[in-house]
Image (spheres, grey):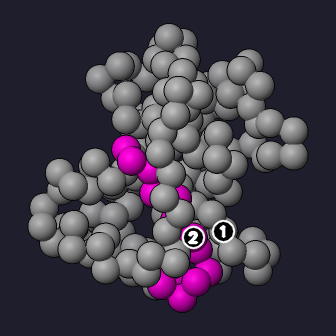
Amino acid sequence: MNGKIKRVYVDNSVVSGMFDDHMPERVAYMKLFWQAVIDGKIKIIASDVLRDEVAAAPQHVREFFASLPESQIEQIVSTDESNDLAAQYVDAKVITEKHMNDCKHIAIATITNADAVVSWNCDDMVNPNKIPKYIEINEQHGYPKEGYKKIEIVTPDKFMEDYL
């Protein structure tokens, strides 16, 4: 990746991933990732969906997220447009309605032209069988918009390997 600051949409698995003590390799990548945020190399796109997930997380996760520099967090609110796109993923049976927040994360990232969605959720988001389906539905509904790029959906370790 080039020297441009990356705008990255994250879900709560990336925030809480700092505390996955049973997975030390994950924590190591999370420390690198969050240090890059603190150092101003990555800007986090934080939607209301993420903020609700963090609000329901354990205290130490909430405190960690609150400690991040506000200058490195772009606050976004879901819209009718993003909710409609998320519903299209469910209608196409890419994912079930039970996992609507995962759909909303991808839809918001798509609509806001994030450089990537970064998540440890390999069942519903960073799933090699589902990513092409998300992209196909995006294209069917006019995304990416002209001048925007196709959304990337990756795990933090993959993002950091490409980023470093």
Which residue is painted at 69% across and 49% down in the image? 113
Q: Which residues are magenta?
A: 36-49
Name the residue beneath numbered marker 2. Answer: 43
Q: Is residue 108 left or right of residue 70?
A: right
Does the magenta-highlighted stretch encompass residue 88?
no
Instruction: Give the crowd class for mark 1: few <14, some 14-19, many >=20 residues within 10 Å.
Output: some
Task: Mark yes or no: residue 47 visible.
Answer: yes
**Contact? badges 1 and 2 (CB < 8 Å):** yes
Which residue is the extreme one toward the bottom?
Answer: 39
Residue type, label 1: Lys
Q: Which corner quadrant of the image does residue 141 belong to?
A: top right
Q: Nearer the viewer, residue 43 or 95?
A: 43
Q: Crowding at label 2, few (<14), some or many (≥20) Cα neighbours within 10 Å?
A: many
Q: Name the residue: 33% across, 64% down.
A: 15
Q: Residue at 63% x, 63% y: name it.
A: 7
Q: Residue furthest left?
A: 59
Mark 1 lies on residue? 6
